[in-house]
Image: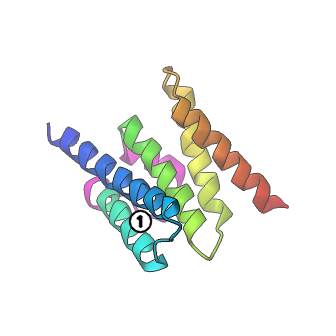
Amino acid sequence: MIQQRKKDYLQRLIEEFFKKLQQAINENRLLSDLEQKAMLDECFDFYSTNFNASREDRATSLMEKINEIELLEQYAKLLMLEFDITEKKDKSRLREAFDIVDYIQKTDTTYSWERTVLREDLLHRLDETLM
């Protein structure tokens, strides 16, 4: 029961972040870098507090610490988002996110359109950074 509440809380945080971002785009205004980073930090803090997951953790370590597929997928989304909004474009973060999504696709037999799109978005960003 507590685990489900944690999962619901994190999903709500991430959904709020994407909702605010989409709303800002629709209104032709951008969230300030400080607002974006604060929301991103809040999401990462949740993982740190509840799963002892550090931003420096490798994908294999994250897969062990975060045992819920949905939360692991959300973490990969956060890594991609972090890459998008930070000035320093760290390709290793994208690779970690891709490794997570690849692991999920291999272990979870249910088809997920969102996961497929996430994987393609990660591949696209990785290809762009190689150019």
Residue with the most extreme front position: 27
- Residue 46 locus on image (x, y percent): 30, 59
Are there few (<14), some (14-19), or many (20+) residues within 10 Å of tag 1?
some
Closest to the observer: 19 or 120?
A: 19
Check if residue 98 falls in the magenta segment. Answer: no
Residue 89, located in which quarter of the rendered image? bottom right
Colouring of the image: rainbow
Closest to the observer: 20 or 78?
A: 20
Closest to the observer: 58 or 116?
A: 116
- Locate the C terminus by quadrant: bottom right
Query: Which amino acid type corresponds to the residue marked 1 in the rendered image?
Result: Leu
Check if residue 57 falls in the magenta segment. Answer: yes
21 lies above or below 100: below
Q: Report helix, strand or loop for mark 1.
A: helix
Residue ID at (55%, 30%): 113
Residue ID at (57%, 50%): 97
- Locate the N terminus by quadrant: top left
- Residue 124 locus on image (x, y percent): 72, 49
Name the residue tied to disc 1: 40
Q: Is residue 118 left or right of residue 125?
A: left
- Residue 81 locus on image (x, y percent): 53, 59
Q: Is residue 39 left or right of residue 99?
A: left
What range of the chain is rendered magenta?
A: 49-66
52 lies above or below 115: below
Residue 63, located in which quarter of the rendered image? top left
Closest to the observer: 30 or 96?
A: 30
Residue ID at (53%, 67%): 28
